[in-house]
Image (cartoon, helix red, strand yellow):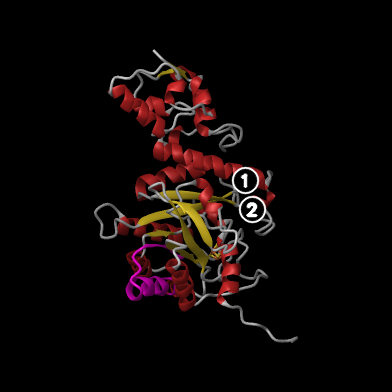
């Protein structure tokens, strides 16, 4: 019948909102880089993830609303954009999630949202869902709540008290880059203050020390270089003790035509490669003992697109190689391109029990990574 506007049901809303949630990757449970863009083929709000213990499971992840009063110029959901706006109420989210949970299809929930009216109004909607699940439904599993920029300390604390993990996207490496992207958000007040406050609540020996905090940069929307992003990332890990930092490559065409990211050269593929290289730099800092100052960059301030940052560092420090597998300490072994923490632990363990290594074949079955490592090693 023409002229009748049908109210969307929960599945229709989920279908719209989960599509929009794909730009937000900052989930603390996916340990695998690929996890954050994988979605179920059918119910696209279900995300297979690798758990920190190596197992795998599925996360129910959605925005509760794609309505937003903000003007983030890189975001397809910004105020004034012509897109289909829908909002899920608490009952809809709870009942859809519990339905999947009872069938054993999901293990946890990741909720985010556009800003409906005010930050605290949006926070109270997110919090009420977590509250129903925790207090009424006695769900004790994984809940990740997005903290809305500009949320009050009271709302942040309430969200933290109900969550396994929280995240607030930092978006840019510093205020000046951020100002090119939004006029409605205040970088220091709306983003940096709550990030610090969450860190205060979740720090070591604090009441909520079990709650993880993560954040996300958007790569290539503004004009910061990778070196600025890496320096900022190092500071966030050091000063705010974040669990993880994520990167999301800006995809050209989604934002306003005059933002820096639209005017700069390079394809979307290159932006995804920048994102990939930033994750590699992040691994070097978190798992390989590199400091942010040691990460090498090209003369344009970005990470090399042609080689990973560890290989780049090795190329700039030929005097450090070859590394002697039978003598070197952990730090030097971890600097060998192609050797990861697991292999290094094995080498050290076997050396401690008296074994000696004669070639990379002693590390395990042939693999491209080991072939790469071979030219940086010697076996005394
Ligand atoms: S706050 Fe900004 S990034 Fe988030 S949904 Fe609104 S416009 Fe998009």
Judge whether residue 148 is colored magenta.
yes
User: How many other residues sit within 10 Å of disc 2, few (<14), some (14-19) or many (≥20)?
Assistant: many
Name the one closer to the observer, 135 or 76.
135
Percent from the top left, x then y, of residue 19?
Answer: 60, 63
Q: Give me the C-alpha separation between circle 2 and circle 1.
A: 8 Å
Q: Residue at x 68, y 70 (%)?
A: 82
Tell me, for residue 251, which label it has, or none.
2
Q: Quadrant of residue 362?
A: top left
Can you say which quadrant of the picture contains the N terminus?
A: bottom right
**Left or right of 10, for residue 203:** left
Q: Residue at x 39, y 46 (%)?
A: 237
Q: Is residue 76 above or below residue 351?
A: below
Tell me, for residue 271, which label it has, or none.
1
Name the one closer to the observer, 35 or 321.
35
Q: Secondary structure at mark 2?
A: loop
Q: Which region of the structure is painted magenta?
A: 125-150
Percent from the top left, x then y, of residue 218?
Answer: 55, 52
Q: Quadrant of ligand 1?
A: bottom right
Q: Residue at x 46, y 69 (%)?
A: 97
Q: Quadrant of residue 15?
A: bottom right
Q: Is residue 369 above or below residue 38?
A: above
Q: Is residue 239 above or below residue 375?
A: below
């Amino acid at each position: 019948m023409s002229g009748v506007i049908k109210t969307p049901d929960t599945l229709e809303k989920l279908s719209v909102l989960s599509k929009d949630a794909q730009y937000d990757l900052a989930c603390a449970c996916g340990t695998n880089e690929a996890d954050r863009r994988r979605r179920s083929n059918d119910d696209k709000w279900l995300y297979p993830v690798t758990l920190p213990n190596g197992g795998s499971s599925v996360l129910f992840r959605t925005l509760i609303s794609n309505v937003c009063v903000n003007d983030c110029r890189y975001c397809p959901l910004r105020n004034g954009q012509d897109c289909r706006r829908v909002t899920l109420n608490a009952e809809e989210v709870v009942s859809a999630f519990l339905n999947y949970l009872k069938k054993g299809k999901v293990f946890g929930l990741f909720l985010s949202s556009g800003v409906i009216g005010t930050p605290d109004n949006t926070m109270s909607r997110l919090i009420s869902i977590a509250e129903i699940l925790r207090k009424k439904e006695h769900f004790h599993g994984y809940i990740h709540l997005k903290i809305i920029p500009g949320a009050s300390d009271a709302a942040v604390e309430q969200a933290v008290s109900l969550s396994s993990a929280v995240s607030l996207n930092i978006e840019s490496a510093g205020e000046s880059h951020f100002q090119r992207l939004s006029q409605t958000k205040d970088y220091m007040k709306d983003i940096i203050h709550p990030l610090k406050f969450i860190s205060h609540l979740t720090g070591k020996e604090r009441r909520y020390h079990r709650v993880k905090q993560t954040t996300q940069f958007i790569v290539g929307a503004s004009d910061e270089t990778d070196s600025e992003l890496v320096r900022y990332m190092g500071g966030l890990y050091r000063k705010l003790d974040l669990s993880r930092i994520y990167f999301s490559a800006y995809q050209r065409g989604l934002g306003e035509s005059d933002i820096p990211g639209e005017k700069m050269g390079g394809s979307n593929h290159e932006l995804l490669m920048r994102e990939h290289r930033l994750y590699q730099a992040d691994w070097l800092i978190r798992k390989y003992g590199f400091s942010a100052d040691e990460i090498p960059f090209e003369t344009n301030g970005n990470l090399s697109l042609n080689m990973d940052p560890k290989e780049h560092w090795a190329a700039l420090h030929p005097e450090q190689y070859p590394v002697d597998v039978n003598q070197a300490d952990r730090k030097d072994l971890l600097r060998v391109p192609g050797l990861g923490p697991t292999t290094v632990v094995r080498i050290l363990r076997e050396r401690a029990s008296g074994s000696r290594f004669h070639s990379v074949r002693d590390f395990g079955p042939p693999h491209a990574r080991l072939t790469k490592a071979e030219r940086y090693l010697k076996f005394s």
